[in-house]
Image: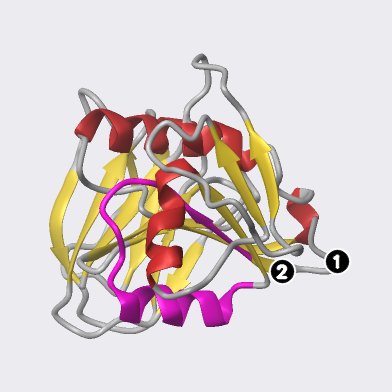
Amino acid sequence: MPPSGQKNILIILGGSSPSDSLLKTTLKEADFVIAADGGIKPLWDIGQWPHILTGDFDSITLPDASPSNCRIIHAPEQNASDFEKAIRYLPTTSEIKQLTILGGIGLRSDHFLTNLLISANLPEEMPLNFRSDTEDIYRITPKYTVTLSIPLQTIVSLVPLTQCKSVYTNGLKWPLTGVNMGIGHQLGQSNVATDNPVTVSIEEGCLLLIINR
């Protein structure tokens, strides 16, 4: 576990691998790194190890030796995904300044959708985002409002993971004011950032803000 106090936590999964540039930038921001199974590969490619490596290790071959500061935890059970195995080792929510997930997007849509559904069930006050070289996905809950400065004219989408009540936005070309979103209600694909900061809040539910890089 990382030392007490708010920390930036990075989880690396085995989806589409981040570029070396994105990985190195995100690693610089991270205080504690967890890799799940194939998520270790991009780290090995740049000669790095996480603080924790876990999974059933069906997609990697572990070397004979590993650094002493890397804890390797074999988790062979098949009723939990790699993401679920990784989040077992998160500190308490109050100690998390930001949880960033690399490798959670791409390759297989079933893995990607499962990762999103798992994220919807994490504590509402936890700041959480999925990051890739092509997009950032921020989770918005009643206890976590997203406020970001992003390049003007950036395409953003609002995708409800659950039924969402009273969605409010600022800084978008087509603003939302107390709108209900979800199946049978309004959706929010392909909006545009026209002012900064962009803010998105909801009163009930779980909403994703997807920002195209």
The residue where tag 1 is placed is 3
Up-down relation of residue 187 to residue 95 (above or below):
above
Nearest the eye: 140 or 213: 213
On screen, residue 90 versus residue 13, left or right, reads right
- CB contact under 8 Å: marks 1 and 2: yes
Q: Which residue is rendered at x = 62% and y = 41% of the image?
A: 87
Q: Amino acid at mark 1?
A: Pro
Nearest the eye: 154 or 33: 33
Label 1 residue SS: loop
Question: Is residue 208 among the parts visible in the rendering?
Answer: yes
State the image coordinates of residue 143 (x, y, percent, origin top left). Answer: 62, 49
**How many neighbours does mark 1 have within 10 angstroms: few (below 14), some (14-19), or many (20 or more)?**
few
- Residue 176 inside the magenta-drawn segment: no
**How many neighbours does mark 2 have within 10 angstroms: few (below 14), some (14-19), or many (20 or more)?**
some
The residue where tag 2 is placed is 7
**Which quarter of the rendered picture does the N terminus lie within?**
bottom right
Q: Which residue is rendered at x = 59% and y = 41% of the image?
A: 54
Up-down relation of residue 133 to residue 94 (above or below):
below
Q: Which residue is rendered at x = 77% and y = 68% of the image?
A: 6
What is the count of numbered marks? 2
State the image coordinates of residue 197 (x, y, percent, origin top left). Answer: 39, 81
State the image coordinates of residue 80 (x, y, percent, origin top left). Answer: 52, 22
The magenta stretch is: 9-30
Q: Amino acid at mark 2?
A: Lys
Quadrant of the rendered structure where residue 180 is?
top left
Label 2 residue SS: strand
Q: Which residue is rendered at x = 43% and y = 51% of the image?
A: 39
Q: Outermost residue toward the top?
A: 79
Up-down relation of residue 13 to residue 10 (above or below):
above
**Which quarter of the rendered picture does the C terminus lie within?**
bottom left
